[in-house]
Structures are given as structure tokens and as C-alpha cells.
Image (spheres, grey):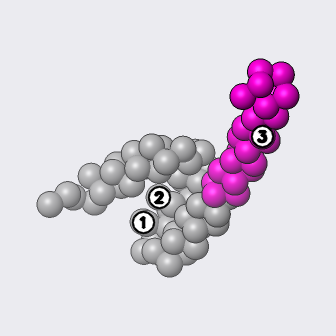
């Protein structure tokens, strides 16, 4: 079982692995230390939604490139 310091270190590492910036990490650590887990979940949910929006924007870009490549193949390569 982890001690409190170990739990905080694990939280920080998990947030870093998830690509969170230092200000978000600091807020989450503060929430953890104050027992404000619902507030932390709210903050993480907002960050998750932001990441998901980024994924969708990038997917649209990929879709545009795939469409363009398909058009070029069909028109210029005869396939």
C-alpha cells in the first residue's frame, strides 16, 4: 500500500503521462491534499473534453487528406 507521498507521486506521474501541463498538475495535487476529489474530477473532465475536441479536429484534417489522396488517385492515377 502506498503512503500519501507515494500516492501524490503516482498522481503527478499519471497526469504527466496524460500530457497535463504543470498548472493543471499543481491544481490536482492541491485538490488531493485538501480532499477535494469532486473538484479534481471536474477539472480532469474539462481537460479530457478539451483533449477529445483536439482529437476530433485532427481527425477532420486526416479525413480531408484521405479525401484529397483518393481524388488524386482516381483522377490522375486511374485507380
Q: Is residue 58 magenta?
A: yes
Circle 1 crowding by C-alpha within 10 Å: few under 14, some 14–19, many from 20: few
Q: Position of residue 29 (x, y in %)?
A: 47, 58
* Location of mark 1 (residue): 33
**Residue drawn at the location 48% of the way across and 44% of the way down:** 16
**Nearer to us in this view, 12 or 4:** 12
The secondary structure type at the circle numbered 1 is helix
**Residue drawn at the location 46% of the way across and 74% of the way down:** 37
Residue 67's tag is 3
Instruction: Determine the main secondary structure of the stretch shown in magenta.
Output: helix
Q: Are marks 2 and 3 in contact (CB under 8 Å)?
A: no
* Location of mark 2 (residue): 29
- Tell me: residue 37, above or below residue 68: below
The secondary structure type at the circle numbered 3 is helix
**Residue drawn at the location 79% of the way across and 31% of the way down:** 74
Q: Earlier in the sequence, mark 2 or mark 3?
A: 2
Lateral position of residue 76 relative to residue 3, left or right: right
Q: Which stretch is magenta?
A: 51-79
Q: Position of residue 1 (x, y in %)?
A: 14, 60
Amino acid at each position: 500500500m502506498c503512503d500519501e507521498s507515494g500516492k501524490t507521486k503516482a498522481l503527478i506521474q499519471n497526469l504527466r503521462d496524460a500530457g497535463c501541463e504543470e498548472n493543471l498538475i499543481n491544481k490536482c495535487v492541491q485538490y488531493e491534499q485538501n480532499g477535494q476529489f469532486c473538484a479534481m474530477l471536474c477539472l480532469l473532465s474539462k481537460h479530457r473534453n478539451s483533449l477529445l475536441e483536439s482529437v476530433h479536429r485532427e481527425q477532420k484534417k486526416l479525413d480531408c487528406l484521405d479525401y484529397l489522396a483518393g481524388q488524386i488517385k482516381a483522377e490522375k492515377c486511374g485507380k
